[in-house]
Image (cartoon, helix red, strand yellow):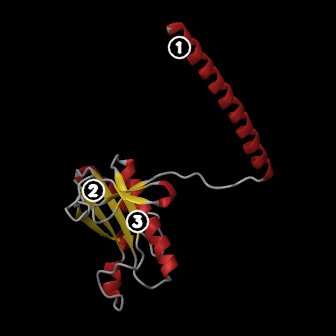
Amino acid sequence: MKEKVRATLSKSLNLASVTVSVGAIALGLTVGAAAAQESIVGERYVPGIWTDPDGCEHWVMDDGVEGYMTPHVTREGIPVCHRGETCAVMNSDQLFASGRYSISAAGREHLAAFFSEAGATAYIITGHTDSRASDEYNMRLSERRAGAVAAIAGSVGARVASMRGYGERQPIASNDTAVGRQQNRRVEIVCLR
């Protein structure tokens, strides 16, 4: 009886594997023919992780769907975020020449010392400008300035969780006065502990 079951089972498995093989070959020929007819060019999708200035960690999934990294949510389903504190606000005029994003030698030394001594587990770096140029120019400049500060942090082994440029969009003073514009030209560093 056992021999009969084994023989039947063996024939069934062999038949199934032949069917799958023939189906796979047919599928391969169909896919190969379709690929020969057209080619699709796209960019490689790489999932990413970032931390917003409010301390909430996010991740990017397939097709740009966004989700929170933390499993902790309130009863309403709102994510619980890790609060950071702004541990440094540096005036851009002290770090950068006007309209530039390369950091002065004194600025590099000051930032390297800060990141070496601050003791945070990670940092969020945001760049800001005044409103004198176009929004597009200010966004690009603030992103590059934040990137330059992040590079200094990386050079001393500090972990940068996120770096962003906000241009003129988050002023802390009026852009109608020289003093207010100077306050708005800044780089903020948030320490995550």
Image-based side of 40 in relation to 156, left or right: right
Numbered disc 3: secondary structure: strand
In this figure, what is the number of numbered marks?
3
> What amino acid type should be assigned to the residue bearing mark 3?
Arg
Image point 22% across, 50% down: which residue?
119
State whether residue 189 appears in this view.
yes
Q: Position of residue 161 (x, y in %)?
A: 35, 55
Residue ID for mark 2 = 114
Q: Nearer the viewer, mark 2 or mark 1?
A: 1
Tell me the distance, in whole angstroms, between the alpha carbons under discs 1 and 3. Answer: 67 Å
Residue ID for mark 1 = 5
Please tell me in which quadrant of the rendered image residue 32 appears: top right
Query: Furthest residue to the left?
Result: 75
Image-based side of 148 in relation to 192, left or right: right
Image point 79% across, 47% down: which residue?
36
Image-based side of 163 in relation to 110, left or right: right
Q: Is residue 137 positioned above or below 95 on the image?
A: below
Residue ID for mark 3 = 164
Numbered disc 2: secondary structure: helix
Numbered disc 1: secondary structure: helix
Q: Position of residue 2 (x, y in %)?
A: 50, 9
Query: Furthest residue to the bottom?
Result: 176
Image-based side of 27 in relation to 192, left or right: right
Image point 34% across, 90% down: which residue?
177
